[in-house]
Image: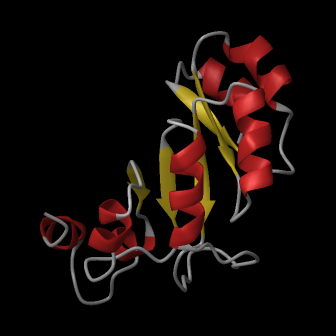
Amino acid sequence: DDPKLAKQINADGCHLGQKDMHINDAKKILKNKIIGMTCHNSIKLAEKAIRNEANYIAFGAFNTTKTKKVKFRADIKTIKKLKKISNIPIVAIGGIDNLNYKKLLLNKADFLAISGYIWNNKKLKPREAIRLLK
């Protein structure tokens, strides 16, 4: 969410939330780097991100999560709707674990953002959690 920091550390890009810097300003800083946009569960926000030439959009949260306070719940129907009108890559986020990730992939999510299940798992170490995602 910080294009200036992303440039400073030579990151591949950054991800912008709806309250972060406008994507056009981020592009001026990052030039040809990857910039993604949070779109919650909104086709309207996704269409805006596409018009602004985001490299990917993120929908979420798909499930309950303790990583971040959930203000918006995403629905697989939103992925399906966007896939009918665009080929922009979609990242699914929010409460994704070894029991629910396949449903998102089968419904055409291109990428999964998985954090809490790996890093805050009280039953499994990170490597073990990752192995269960294969």
Q: Is residue 76 left or right of residue 124?
A: right
Q: At x 25% / y 77%, what residue is drawn?
A: 98
Q: At x 30% / y 64%, what residue is drawn?
A: 106
Q: Is residue 133 left or right of residue 25?
A: left
As drawn, which residue projects farthest toward the bottom?
123
Q: Nearer the viewer, residue 69 or 62?
A: 62
Whether residue 16 is visible to the viewer of this picture, yes or no, is yes
66 relative to 6, above or below:
below
Q: At x 78% / y 50%, what residue is drawn?
A: 45
Q: Quadrant of the N terminus?
A: top right
Q: Is residue 22 left or right of residue 117?
A: right
Q: Quadrant of the C terminus?
A: bottom left
Q: Position of residue 68 (x, y in %)?
A: 64, 74
119 relative to 3, above or below:
below
Q: Position of residue 93 (x, y in %)?
A: 51, 64
Q: Position of residue 49 (x, y in %)?
A: 74, 37
Q: How was the colour assigned to the protein in this rendering?
A: secondary structure
9 relative to 31, above or below:
below
As drawn, which residue projects farthest toward the front?
84
Q: Nearer the viewer, residue 69 or 107?
A: 107
Q: Is residue 42 left or right of residue 35?
A: right
Q: Position of residue 125 (x, y in %)?
A: 21, 75
Whether residue 17 is visible to the viewer of this picture, yes or no, is no
When asked about the image quadrant of residue 30, the answer is top right
Number of residue marks: 0
